[in-house]
Amino acid sequence: MSELYSLPDGWEWKTFDNVLILIQNGISDTQNDEGIGFPISRIETIQNETLDSNRIKYVDISDKSIIEKYRYDYGDILFSHINSFEKVGKVCLYTNQIENLLHGVNLLRMKFIDDLDSRFVFYYLISNMSRVFYEPYIKKAINQASINQKNIKSIPIPLPPLSEQQRIVSKLDNLFEKIDKSIALHQKNIDEADIFMASVLNDVFVELEEKYGLDNIGNMIDILTDYHSNGAYKDLKANVELLDEEDYALMIRATDLENGDYTNNVKYITESAYNFMSKSKVFGGEIILPKIGTIGNVYFMPYLERPVSLAMNLFMLRCSDKVMNKYMFLFLKSPRGNENILNKANGAVTKTITKDAVRSIELPFPPLKTQQKVVAYLDEISQKMDKIKEIQKEKMQSLKELKASILDKAFKGEL
């Protein structure tokens, strides 16, 4: 664990065990989406250090003692102790954002002594300084990580007198309000760039549709494949194992494509597994679609200059020599293309799409030379929008780093 640093006069180091009056997991009763009963928190409810009212469910409970035991009180802190490694430690402060919210399983609820302002604790837990202390205790497992209550109780926290806690919280509130407004402005600029690009895409493909009509994707592709095209489930299980340590081939997943990160927190397979899955080798330039869950997302596979294989729950398309992969990708990214994909999906809660449904999606089919001109025109605009977005993201990152720096000063008594 990181060494404790010197504190100003009047401050002292405590552990969470010294200042907690309650730390508990939540109830695991059956949840519903119909709004029956009381709202209940879930892992997903914590978003951007606050509560997202769109990510709750409900539990139908009538036992008053259970309701009172698990109903959040103003000032409680929610702590994500079971999540992905990076997301263990996500927190938010309950300030009655959702009335009568009950405490659900897989989130810890914390209450603190009267001499401790829970807002001070919240700011401490979102700081890099607290993460340094508890990260060594996070245990990794398959597809998740966790930290136990015993280790959380051992986390050190620097404590000034209550009046100083309140002064620091007030200053942080004021500073962060200004910084968050600036971040929101940069995000608005990014959103407007996306809206503009979507409008351009829509205008182009509406015009092409009016001029050339529509044809099915099935008539334009040479390959539509997925992970399970390589054999039966038992054969895949016997021949393919996902690895955390770097190996021969990268197993490309939707999350990698979404993040544009092909190095951190990725999965690998051996050369033997790669060769076994000969029908889903990925070389770059393909179109990749989710076939369950995030239907409507579309990715253009980059050239990674290494062996790559397609992960589960994705389709991969390669066009015939009469159609540019990039042209089809740009159409599917357009509002009209997205609508066409969603119209072919099945399911109310968890959406899915089949190979036949993908083949039946319609798009304009102009001559190859026209496609080339369209791609060049849209790429030029897209690059300009990407540059605008990149600048805005850099500014947002600088502001987030400023917040981290301010928090560091706050908990060293320098604010």
Image (spheres, helix red, strand yellow):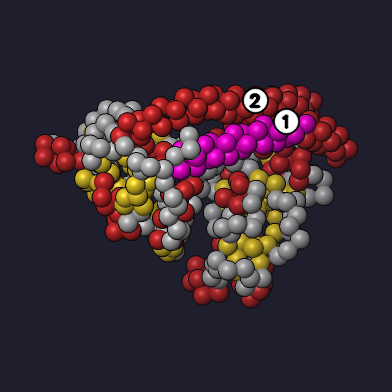
Residue 110 sits above or below residue 86 on the image: above
x, y percentage for residue 93? Answer: 35, 35
Amino acid at circle 2: Asn
Residue drawn at x 69%, y 40% is 216
Q: Nearer the viewer, residue 392 or 201?
A: 392
Q: Nearer the viewer, residue 14 or 32?
A: 14
x, y percentage for residue 178? Answer: 53, 24
Amino acid at circle 1: Ile
Q: Using the rendered view, name the quadrant where residue 213 is placed.
A: top right
Residue at the disc numbered 1: 388
x, y percentage for residue 101? Answer: 26, 34
Q: CA distance from mark 2 to mark 1?
A: 8 Å
Q: Using the rendered view, name the quadrant where residue 349 is placed.
A: top left
Q: Decide if residue 102 is on the left or right side of residue 155.
A: left
Residue at the disc numbered 2: 189
Residue 39 sits above or below residue 206 on the image: below
Q: Nearer the viewer, residue 232 or 201?
A: 201
Mark 2 vs 1, N-terminal side: 2
Helix, strand or loop: magenta stretch? helix
